[in-house]
Image: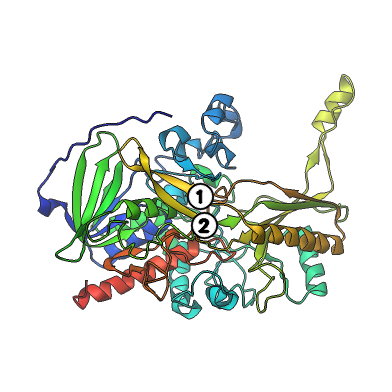
Amino acid sequence: MKLKQVKMTYVNIVGEKQRTFDAIVIGSGISGGWAAKELTEKGLKTLVLERGRNIKHVVDYPTTLLNEWELEHRGKLPLKVRNENPIASRCYAFREDAAHFFSKDKDHPYIQKKPFDWIKGYQVGGKSLLWARQVQRWSDFDFEGPTRDGFAVDWPIRYKDLAPWYSYVEKFTGVSGNKDGIPELPDGEFLPPYELTRVEKHFKKKISQHYNDRHVIIARCAHISQANDIFLEQGRMQCQNRTICQRGCPYGGYFSSNSSTLPTAVKTGNLTMKTDSVVESLIYDDKKEKVTGVRVINAHTNEITEYFSRIIFVNASAVNTNLILLNSKSSRFPNGLGNDNELMGKYFAFHNYRAKVQAEYNGFRNFTTDGRRPTNGYIPRFRNVRKQETDFLRGYAAVVNSYRPKITKKKGIGISLKNNLMNPEWGPWKIKSYMMGETIPKETNFVCLDSIKKDSWGMPLLKFSVDYDNNDEKMISDYFEQMSEMFEYAGFTKIKVHDTHQAPGLEIHEMGGVRMGKDPKTSLLNEWNQLHSCKNVFITDGACMTSTGTQNPSLTYMALTARAVDYALKEINKHNL
């Protein structure tokens, strides 16, 4: 693919004073939105830089109130669109009702030394408009994992350090769930839970009778199941259980930057948002020994502008955060900002979603489901939690979902055919599960800058070399075995296992490359998410993750962000930043 090369021009649009802020946030997604909210509420004049277009809550959700038959292709995308976007089209949400929130493949190319499906959403709110909204806390079993198992490096924090910040963000975000009392999946600040189906309750009962270390629960989700004052003040209403969340929610029933944190930041009067602003690099001042600002390329004109601030939060999403830091080169940091140990971009990790199991259940024929719910059943990790018990490291969680399909008979002629089509019958219960496996961060899994190829803005293309390993294969085999065993014990039949063999990345849980740690020789960030060698730069998106856990990671990003902003303000007040 031949990339357009445009000569870039530096323009001093306004004086340096007008381009200077107390803080700059790069990215407006889940973690960037939280950084903006926290910084502005604490009185800092904050600039948020978003490389994509503006998306206004409610106003810019064009399909949110349409019925399926009002979509031109009934929700399907034309073959031409799918062929033009072979990567994006692999995502379940890349359909006619939400394709406009995805970045198109041809506009944002990258290099795959090994297959990696990089799903991107460049707009205000980022992928917070598209995420699956599942939110589970980490526990010390996760934070202590690297030390216990001998992989990666030790986390510089533990659950007690993040627990109050989990509570802080849950109360504002809105999280539905049960107090399940499971040590490996700590309870939180929950709104009323959604309900398991009749078959899932049966499965839960059978598993609790047979296993003492396995739990079937309703998954915690970032949906307002009860509209308390804190949500009404944000302009958000109770979730309507429409389950078309990828279109954008006009009610604000699920958490997104657009409906929650960014409007809150706007209300302070301290927020400046600049869209269509591609961050090229961070500007390091050798004399001051800190970053003084950010160099930005206009997405449409390729003109360059520099903005300045005391502190910088880089929340461009894990992959782009790595790209920006690697591209931020200076005489002090020739290999990228803060990259003294040359580990930046390495130990990149993800979640393993390849494995699925499905079955049928012939009981409960007098039951079906009523309405919809925005979440599923969930089995927290149970392998290698308290001790090493398998021939693979770490473990997996599992999603469980059951339903009764309607079966339409298409036999007959005339009246008999019409009657068959008009009177579908309920089929037997179906139950499905998929694995959420923890992958082991490895130096051989990395992202880096290509030395030759550039994008439309003259920035180096990012190169991926990320793959599964033998540990992942063993984990898949164990999941197939254990889930099939649990299904069989519960009386399910026609059990089938399936390995999708999908490339890494499609789970959209990219993590690592700028990992936290105690030792500057083996990590890039300290316990406060500061770059070890550049204290006024904070990284709180997925790039900061030392290991991946089995939980959906967004809640942890939010908690880390709120905690880091609180620390940054204290350091500013002490004149340390």
Labelled disc at residue 46 = none
Whether tag 1 and tag 2 are in contact, CB under 8 A, the answer is yes
Image check: 461 left or right of 298?
right
- Which quarter of the rendering shows the C terminus? bottom left
Q: Quadrant of residue 182?
A: bottom right
Q: Quadrant of residue 231?
A: bottom left
Q: In percent of the image, x 64 and y 68: which residue is there? A: 393
Q: Position of residue 143 (x, y in %)?
A: 52, 74
Q: Earlier in the sequence, mark 1 or mark 2?
A: 2
Image check: 32 left or right of 410?
left
What's the amino acid at mark 2?
Thr
Indicate whether 572 appears above or below 94. below
- Which quarter of the rendering shows the N terminus? top left
What's the amino acid at mark 1?
Ser
Q: In percent of the image, x 30 and y 57: which residue is there? A: 25
Q: Which residue is mark 1?
A: 465
Image check: 442 left or right of 343?
right
Residue situated in front as seen by the camera: 383 or 190: 383
- Looking at the image, what colour scheme do you see? rainbow
Can you see residue 198? Answer: no
**Is the residue marked by circle 1 packed among few (<14), some (14-19), or many (20+) residues within 10 Å?**
some
Q: Position of residue 471 (x, y in %)?
A: 65, 62
Indicate whether 526 appears above or below 174. below
Image check: 313 left or right of 199?
left
C-alpha distance separating marks 1 and 2:
7 Å
Q: Position of residue 96 (x, y in %)?
A: 54, 33
Can you see residue 178? Answer: yes
Secondary element at image label 1: strand
Q: Which residue is mark 2?
A: 444
